[in-house]
């Protein structure tokens, strides 16, 4: 099984980005400092040197369908916050506020409250305010208990504190922050692998082994933002890369400059069992696992060799997983 | 037929807002200047007197299903921009940037390009940059050509230029800016009324009368933001109210202070034919029409009597539709 067979078309996704590029760029003005493909959109508020607003948007994909199978929504708001805020901090910005869009088949107040409470709790960890939201009821086009979520985060970046591609140098080390679970990526593939399990969960006939697996799948995402913000404000980071759709290496490549390459040593850590089981249960090729899942490294930090110890000691379970050399591929497995 | 019968539960919607209030407010800090229920969330960037960021989010509801019936997506991006930006300018803020979230059953690059081009064109009218977006492919949970869109707009407000509830006074006049069509509200009810018509459109067997009606339903929303921004910067507005879900009066009530009431004189304008037809075809009660649709007034402006002529002359077809007096209902029909 691969992602394409599960219905997610990465070739079309790249083509869609090409198809919209000129329309998107036609809206840019002199305040826009980013281009398509970064971890966040950058907008300078005033003259050169003034504060830069950074904005991100993301959803939780079809992890909603896994939640829906047992009505387990209490971690999904946290997933949404993690997807948006952990992208945002990869630019060096400090999150200010968040908005959510919830599309529901039927407006069920207690379910909405569960989702928003989950978001609010997650937002407390970075003092980010939930200043707006929309609940869109779509009767007939969504099943009553079907839900889709999108989040929007805005942060402020001090231009002096920006991290990313311009700071990375040959010899930098890559530190991985551990993720015990899938976060909120690759769930269309996960659902295709565990169709029967999810049917059993829905039907209330799951075995104890299936219930255990379900708990692993539905676990909420770790939020790395507080750690990344502290490291950024202590000038300990050159770059940070959130392992979302595309996996560790594809995302890391977004913060490595032309002419360099981050080599990720796959032997430096062990995958959490949920990933090895998934690979086995779905007969998923290694290349597909690597380009779809975080494989246990939810955030990759690029740091000066002198700062490796300080960064490793800032987060339990973090590991040095690679280094930056010269090369043409920006990031690769080794 | 009413909105409840069409599957949209306004009682539950109010209950959901109550259910999330304490969680939402728990995220507020001293920078947050708005509460739940305004046209935008307000976040002060620095100390008192500094610029205020305003953010809005909205979708286009199930107008997507009307578009899908004939694959007519070229106005839907404009609808999304109108829903978000026309809310934003009701606070007095000038839009800076926009992000979009597109959930699709299948990532069809040409369709995505049509939607994003429609957004970009609409954003040009207010020099708003499209700095981010997410295309979320949801195979299996959405039909291949099913789409949902959410937009997110951020603007900057000079505290001196804020408009809204604090500026409105007894004797102010209400000026309506015309909307020739439904904009992007009430479509779950519209779809319930025109189920057969939409079936005929889908099947390619629509009569010329049905095709004409379809064109009326799918027409993109007017974008009022350029006009509202000009009037705001010329200090000609006390408040502005975008007629979205809830209709003219419900939205106008959001910008009228306690103890006052805007009286809207229903005899001052004629409904565009699409609304009278809809009321007739769906046997929709007048009260339901008024609480669901814009009825031809897409934006209501509250202005000092001395500025009525200037405002009327700024927008073709605008009309004086009411005035502000003392009262307990904030806004009402008369």
Image (cartoon, coloured by chain):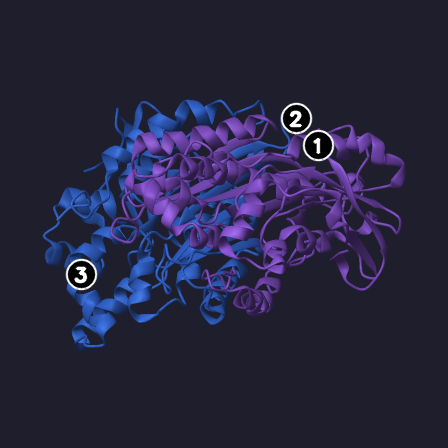
Chain colours: A blue, B purple
Secondary element at image label 1: loop
Circle 2 packing at 10 Å, graded few (<14), some (14-19), many (20+), is few
Judge whether residue A163 can be spotted in this image. no
Q: Does B181 appear above or below A195?
A: above
CA separation, marks 3 and 2?
53 Å
Q: Quadrant of residue A278?
A: bottom left
B61 vs B128: above or below? below
Is A26 placed left or right of B38 in the picture?
left
Provide the secondary structure element on which disc 3 rests.
Answer: loop
User: Which residue has dot 2 on it?
Assistant: A47
**Residue B269 appears anywhere in the view:** yes
Quote the CA–CA distance across marks 1 and 2: 39 Å
Residue at 86% x, 55% y is B325
**Residue A222 x/y as whole percent:** 39, 58
- The residue at 89%/48% (across/down) is B171
Q: Residue tagged by mark 3?
A: A194
Q: Earlier in the sequence, mark 3 or mark 2?
A: 2
- Residue B317, disc: 1
Q: Position of residue A269 (x, y in %)?
A: 23, 52
Q: Is residue A11 above or below residue A66?
A: above
At x 71% / y 28%, what residue is drawn?
A: B316
């Amino acid at each position: 099984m691969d992602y394409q067979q599960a219905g997610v078309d990465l070739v079309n996704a790249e083509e869609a980005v090409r198809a919209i590029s000129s329309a998107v760029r036609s809206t840019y003005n002199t305040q826009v400092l980013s281009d398509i493909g970064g971890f966040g959109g950058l907008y300078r508020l005033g003259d050169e040197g003034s504060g830069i607003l950074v904005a991100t948007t993301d959803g939780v994909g079809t992890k909603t369908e896994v939640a829906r199978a047992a009505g387990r929504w209490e971690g999904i708001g946290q997933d949404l916050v993690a997807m948006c805020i952990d992208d945002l901090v990869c630019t060096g910005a400090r999150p200010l506020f968040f908005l959510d869009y919830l599309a529901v088949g039927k407006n069920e107040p207690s379910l909405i409250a569960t989702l928003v409470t989950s978001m609010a709790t997650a937002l407390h960890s970075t003092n980010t305010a939930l200043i707006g939201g929309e609940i869109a009821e779509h009767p007939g086009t969504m099943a009553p208990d079907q839900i889709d979520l999108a989040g929007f985060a805005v942060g402020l970046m001090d231009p002096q504190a920006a991290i990313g591609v311009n700071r990375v140098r040959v010899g930098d080390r890559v530190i991985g922050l551990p993720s015990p679970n899938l976060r909120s990526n690759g769930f269309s593939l996960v659902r295709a692998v565990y169709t029967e399990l999810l049917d059993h969960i829905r039907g209330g006939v799951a075995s104890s082994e299936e219930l255990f697996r379900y708990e692993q799948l539905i676990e909420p995402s770790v939020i790395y933002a507080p750690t990344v913000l502290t490291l950024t404000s202590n000038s300990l980071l050159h770059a940070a890369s959130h392992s979302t759709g595309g996996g560790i290496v594809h995302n890391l490549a977004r913060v490595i400059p032309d002419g360099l390459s981050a080599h990720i040593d796959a032997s430096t850590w062990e995958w959490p069992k949920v990933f090895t089981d998934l690979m086995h249960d779905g007969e998923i090729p290694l290349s597909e696992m690597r380009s779809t899942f975080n494989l246990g490294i939810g955030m990759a930090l690029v740091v000066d060799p002198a700062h490796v110890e300080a960064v490793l000691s800032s987060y339990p379970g973090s590991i040095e997983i690679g280094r930056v050399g010269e090369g043409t591929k920006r990031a690769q497995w080794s």
